[in-house]
Amino acid sequence: MPPKPKPLPLHRQPLTFDQFWAELGYSAIEFTGDAKLKRTLDATNIHEMNPRTHFVHIANIVSKLVRSKYRLRNRIHPLITFQEIPEEKGIRSPQLVATSLGPVRKDDFSWSGIEAAVEIQSPGRNRQDSHNMAPSFTTCLLQGRPDRISVQGFYVGVDTLELIVTSGAGVKRSPPIDLKRSEDRILLLAFVKRLYIPHIFMIDPTIQRYQDPETKRWLFDITLKNTGPGKDFTCKGYQIIYAREVFQERAHIFVNHEAPAVLNGRKIPVIKDVYPFPDVDNGFSEVKIIEHAHGNGEVPGVVRMVYAELVRFDDGSQIYWGKCSKTRICLEDYGEPLTSRITPKELLTVIYDSLEISRVIYRNTNIVHRDLSIGNILIKTSEDAKDTPSHTYEAYEASDTPVAFCGASYLLGETTYQRETRALIIDLERAEILDKGLPRASITAWYKLIQGTRFAYGTTARAVYGKVFPDRLTRFQCVPSIKRTVRRTDSRPETPFHELRYDAESIFWVLAWWMINATPYNKPSTHIKRGLWEALMCNDCDTRPIEFDRSDLHPSYAPMIDLLDDLSRTVKNDYPWTKDEPHGHPEFLHEALQRIILNFIFENEEKNFMNLPTSGVPRVPGEDTSGSLGIVDVKRGREPDYRGSAKPQKRARNF
């Protein structure tokens, strides 16, 4: 079953009236001292109506009164109406919304087009559940409205009406509104006025939204400040492809791949707005990590940055989300998710290259990513793969840095350009420069086993690999043996940091996730064993199947089980417990996985299953409770994350 939703940081006790007026950026006397306004509100007779049965009517009366009272022009402030959402849209849609778009149809509902969400307690719903649903809808609204720092919502209970403001500071509720009280009716009017005229600190002035009249998609124009002497630059027509949970490190990813903005001759297909936790001591921001990674020459496959800035209000003050200041990063590289329609061969070349990228940035810049997952490794188009950095390290593998990148496509003879790669590693927010890092995790294991590793390496693969990387063949020599050799050690790992091999483990789990979820195009899907699915997706402990069965994969991709078995046997070794060479070398696991993957590609690249594209739709779990048998429990204790992460990042938990 899916993981339980995380509790929202709700204010169980509502604010006082004075506090809520301040939250709106108003002084109560501005409104309560207006005798004419009081008389006008009294004349509407909303005090005689029941909010639970007549809320839409009440809210629309107040909305029209606001436009009339404050002479709001239709072109700038079109009428905001409260209306019902068709039930077919699903339980994650509110029952009522405030919007300026006219009638809301079920086929074009979007959070980006909503001004406020309304939750009305239905007769069959528990009051507490309904009470919590209202702020839940405001968090969805914040995800769809990157132009807003805070948003508004309404909760209508059986016998109560509450106003809600949600931002990085949490959920702020008004005291219960009694429409029979004149002061409460005035507060409701002021609250609706904020829907038309948000306080300057409720909006991000650098983002403007609009709806494309043809596609009906919501697009955003994003203005970059100070890109030149006294000059602003606007990136037009970007759409949201990702929005992160709003009460952690809020983030939005915008994309315009077809017609990206061009700044100083460099394309910007992707813009990332993020509120990273404040750096402490030796903490690293994503901007610093990207700059460091490419500092002495651009590294293929690592996302490149065109421009970055701290986002500010019009008065020059920084925009904050709680204690986190807003950072905007303009990126030069774009890729599709690994869940898009690709073949196993394409996937394996990306996985191989991701391992290569990981060890190259470690060798050259001492960076470990720490958060490699199915969402942080992308695949570029064949055309974009050729757009790789030309100014890179020229040295081949050597005992000293730097080391050059060489992709799988070159080793396979598919290109003469060694730096060409379709792999793209993004989201370096959790990355770390090890020689400057902070302690992250202490490591404990339930057993201390090191299994002998054999490199099942074909003649062709070895010859090609050895020609490009003769030093690696010398450094990482293992005696071929089908029989496993067990070694024991009483030594403990000395470093408390996230190590390079953990990134290799994460990449293995990305590959395992892809194999298990892959369904071929134009062929019927099959179910994933529920036990396997839960072990991969739903377990809070780092306890996952490490031995797989042929039936764990779709029948069309079943021949890949041999690869998965070879990789899993290699990954489950406890390398931190040995100092023996080459097993104790930081790059050993990368080397082992790369050789196994490359050899599998050479041996199978012409077979049908390797060139069978996926449907792009992952498999779903079945009703049975069976799963793979071999379970390895590795419990890893954790030190606090000093950068303020909401929860520790598991060493290989990415799903």
Image: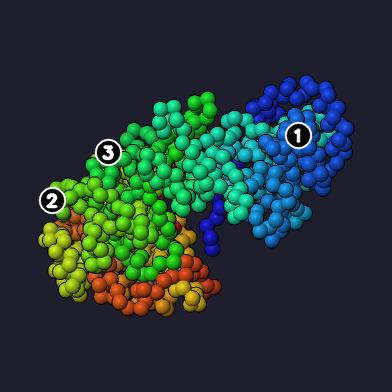
Quarter of the rendering containing residue 430: top left
Which is closer to the viewer, label 1 or label 2? Answer: 1
- Which residue has dot 2 on it? 399
Instruction: Classify mark 1: helix, strand or loop.
Output: helix
Choose the circle earlier in sequence order: 3 or 1: 1
> Residue at horizontal 53%, vertical 28%?
314
Quarter of the rendering containing residue 92: bottom right
Choose the circle earlier in sequence order: 1 or 2: 1
Question: Residue 67, labelled with which disc?
Answer: 1
Kind of residue indicated by mark 3: Lys
How many marks on residues?
3
In front of the other: 322 or 295: 295
Q: Residues within 10 Å of mark 2 (few under 14, many from 20)?
A: few
> Residue at horizontal 78%, vertical 29%?
69
Instruction: Report whether residue 414 is seen.
Output: yes
Residue 150 in the image: x percent, y percent? 59, 37
> Residue at horizontal 46%, vertical 50%?
259
CA–CA distance in space, label 3 to label 2: 22 Å
Q: Residues within 10 Å of mark 3 (few under 14, many from 20)?
A: few
Residue 446 in the image: x percent, y percent? 32, 59
Answer yes or no: do the residues labelled 3 and 1 have beta carbons within 8 Å?
no
User: Vertically, is 111 above or below 618?
Assistant: above
Question: Residue 603, labelled with which disc?
Answer: none
Kind of residue indicated by mark 1: Arg
Choose the circle earlier in sequence order: 3 or 2: 2
CA–CA distance in space, label 1 to label 2: 72 Å
Q: How crowded is mark 1: few (under 14 residues within 10 Å), some or many (20 or more)?
A: some
- Which residue has dot 3 on it? 436
User: Vertically, is 537 above or below 29?
Assistant: below
Instruction: Classify mark 2: helix, strand or loop.
Output: loop
